[in-house]
Amino acid sequence: MRTEIDKLRSVRAPLMLLLAAQLVIVAGVSGLFLGGGADAADPVTARRAVAHAGLVSLFSLLLGILAVAGEYRHRTITDTYLGTPRRGRVIAAKLAVHTAAGVVFGLVSSVVAMTATAVWLSARGGALDLGSSAIWGTVAGCVAWNACFAAVGVGVGALIRNVTAAVAAALAWLALVEGIAGQLLGDLGRWLPFRSAQALEGVPFPGIDLLPQWAGGLALAGYAAVFVLLAASVTVRRDVT
């Protein structure tokens, strides 16, 4: 775990992903209020703005993918396994460290989202109600979403060892496959990964039927566990190169 922490601190990719996520959050929150459909007096508006901290969990997913697939790309994975021959321990360490990094991503993103939301609400004559349990419920969901997606990323990166292929597969699922699968499955589409993650924020979206917040959290945690268990099983059995 110390080695994994050192790796995170010694490369620029995590910081660049974190900064990119904050830029997307500020742009997203600004777009929500500039679009003209945001009512500053409606408490749901503030929650939808803060929810951008969860939507950028894609960057946490990429961080998790790079944790394993990035080592195969740069051919450092051999040294990693020579230093720790028990590969299950390596995957477990990567999972723990990068899930924690996902929590950090979620916390930083939530602070930025709340700050941007407060600024825009103030400009529109409103205020962000920090005493609202609903707001903090959304923040908790955003942090959990980032943590779970980082864990899923570790699993995806271990299963698909090519960085480009792993990222392409993840983006294709989120942008295309899940939407089609959701239409085919009907009401069961609520249990798919991205829809489950959306439910974690506890924010109602017009025209979208979501699970309860607790159910979304359990479903997403279940997906993360499945990916990691599959990754650990496959990693132990196949060749390094």
Image: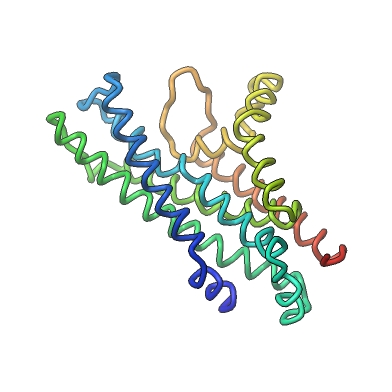
- Residue 46 at x, y percent in the picture: 29, 34
Q: Position of residue 207 (x, y in %)?
A: 48, 17
Rendered-image quadrant of the N terminus: bottom right
Where on the picture, by quarter, is residue 26? top left
Residue at image position (87%, 63%) is: 238
Q: In this orientation, which residue lies closer to the viewer: 76 or 129?
A: 76
The residue positioned 73% from the left and 57% from the top of the image is 158
Q: Is residue 125 above or below residue 109?
A: above
Which residue lies most toward the left here? 125
Whole-percent x, y for residue 157 in the image? 69, 55
Q: Is residue 231 left or right of residue 189?
A: right
- Residue at position x 51%, y 49% in the image: 59
The residue at the far bottom in this view is: 83
Number of numbered discs overlaid on the protein picture: 0
Residue 19 place in picture, x, y as percent: 40, 53
| Position of the C terminus by quadrant | bottom right
- Taking the spot 21% from the left edge, 39% from the top edge, the residue there is 128
Front-most of residues 114 and 14: 14
- Res. 211 image quadrant: top right
161 with respect to 53 (left or right): right
**Residue 128 sits above or below residue 1 on the image:** above
Instruction: Tell me if residue 9 comes above or below residue 165 in the rendering.
Output: below
The answer to whether 80 appears left or right of 129 in the picture is right
Front-lying residue, 234 or 216: 234
